Image: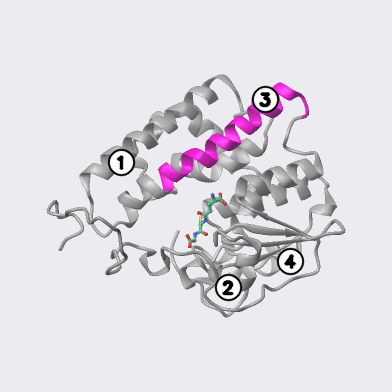
């Protein structure tokens, strides 16, 4: 039966039958937990990040690079790639840091007791609070920062899991879900565009973790880097969003953050593991024999 077949009748109880055929179907399971035993690697720095350069992953590497650029030397970190397409998020070591088996996940060894941090929004807040940076101290702006941070955490699943999934990853185009999620994606773009028509950044005049959380999703979409959907969603109409996206894209820390744990695209833009600031100059994939895969 075609997945687009309208003869589908709802069973009383859902069971997993044949794989859906969509991209990532091989790693989707209806249960949680580890599938194999393996510890995670650890490096020399107080922060150990386990991630991949997807939109959710780069939020954290951008913040680390911004903190270091600001002079917070205590924000040095080791970043290890988790190959989610190969199921590495299901190792016992990873599941101990994030029981939800999704990147990014962070171990903070700066205090007496190691602290695990999962969910990208929680990681951004943890680091911003710890270093007193990119989270304004006056209550109205601090709250506005949190508003847009939590807005992103709640909204992006409609963009990624909804629009992106049905537009780019489903085995065949289906009008109903594409209509539903294209409408919602455009509404979200308009929400941001209206806000950014009146303010330089999402929380106001200051660049904050709200921008760092939203840019990898909505900035990338506006810049035509996500799902090849720029024309479909007519992203050029959102001029204020585009202005904001371009401004953040030009930040050196953002350009570095995008490279960390990136396993695809141009080899000189891929830094598979990050252990030192000098790695950006000396350890990108073009410097090694290993082959870089993918596109983008
Ligand atoms: N709400 C989570 C979402 C994380 C997430 O969806 N991560 C994806 C990559 S962008 C992942 O690890 N997927 C692997 C899987 O679903 O098995 C966050 O913001 O940290």
Q: Reading the chain from its start, which is encountered first: label 3 or label 4?
A: 3
Identify which residue, 14 or 253, lies in the foreground: 14
70 lies above or below 103: above
| Whether label 1 touches label 2, CB < 8 Å | no
Q: Is residue 95 above or below residue 189?
A: below
Provide the residue designation for mark 1. Answer: 232
Front residue of 43/272: it is 43
Name the mark on residue 275. Answer: 4
Label 3: few (<14), some (14–19) or many (≥20) C-alpha neighbours in 10 Å: few
Query: How far is mark 1 from mark 3, CA to CA?
Result: 31 Å
Question: Mark 4 or mark 2: which comes first in sequence?
Answer: 2
Q: What element does badge 1 sit on?
A: helix
Q: CA gap, disc 3 to disc 4?
A: 33 Å
Q: Residue most toward the front?
A: 12
Which SS class for mark 4? loop
**What is the x, y in percent for residue 279?**
71, 65
Which residue carries the number 2 mark? 91
Q: Are marks 1 and 4 in contact (CB under 8 Å)?
A: no
**Residue 213 seen in the figure:** yes
Q: Are marks 2 and 3 in contact (CB under 8 Å)?
A: no
Q: CA distance from mark 2 to mark 3?
A: 42 Å
In this figure, which residue is indicated by the disc labeled 3? 205
Is 157 part of what is drawn in magenta?
yes
Q: Main secondary structure of the magenta part?
A: helix
* As drawn, 148 above or below 289: above
User: In this rendering, does residue 247 appear at all?
Assistant: no
Quick one: label 1, few (<14), some, or many (20+) residues within 10 Å?
few
Q: Which mark is residue 257?
A: none
Mark earlier in primary sequence (1, 2):
2
Specify start and end residues of the magenta stretch as a single range: 137-160
Is ligand 1 less than 8 Å from the beta carbon at label 1? no
Q: What is the distance, in whole Å, between disc 1 and disc 2 at their CAs?
A: 38 Å
């Amino acid at each position: 039966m075609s997945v687009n077949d309208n003869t589908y009748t709802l069973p009383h109880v859902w069971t997993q039958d044949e794989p859906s055929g969509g991209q990532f179907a091989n790693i989707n399971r209806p249960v949680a937990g580890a599938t194999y035993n393996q510890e995670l690697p650890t490096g020399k720095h107080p922060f150990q990040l386990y991630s991949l350069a997807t939109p959710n992953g780069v939020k954290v590497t951008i913040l680390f690079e911004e903190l270091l650029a600001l002079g917070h030397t205590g924000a040095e970190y080791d970043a290890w790639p988790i190959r989610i397409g190969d199921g590495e998020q299901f190792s016992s070591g990873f599941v101990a840091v994030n029981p939800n088996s999704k990147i990014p996940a962070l171990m903070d060894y700066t205090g007496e007791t190691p602290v695990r941090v999962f969910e990208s929004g929680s990681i951004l807040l943890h680091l911003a609070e710890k270093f007193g940076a990119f989270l304004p101290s006056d209550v109205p702006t601090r709250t506005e920062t949190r508003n847009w941070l939590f807005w992103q955490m709640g909204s992006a699943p409609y963009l990624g899991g909804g629009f992106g999934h049905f537009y780019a990853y489903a085995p065949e185009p289906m009008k109903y879900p594409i209509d539903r999620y294209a409408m919602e994606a455009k509404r979200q773009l308009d929400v941001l565009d209206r806000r950014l028509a009146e303010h330089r950044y999402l929380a106001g005049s200051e660049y904050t973790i709200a921008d760092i959380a939203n840019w990898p999703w909505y900035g990338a979409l506006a810049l035509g880097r996500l799902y090849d959907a720029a024309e479909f969603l007519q992203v050029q109409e959102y001029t204020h969003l585009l202005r904001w996206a371009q401004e953040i894209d030009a930040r050196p820390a953002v350009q570095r953050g995008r490279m960390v744990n990136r396993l695809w695209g141009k080899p000189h833009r891929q830094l598979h593991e990050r252990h030192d600031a000098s790695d950006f100059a000396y350890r990108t994939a073009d410097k090694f024999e290993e082959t870089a895969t993918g596109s983008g």
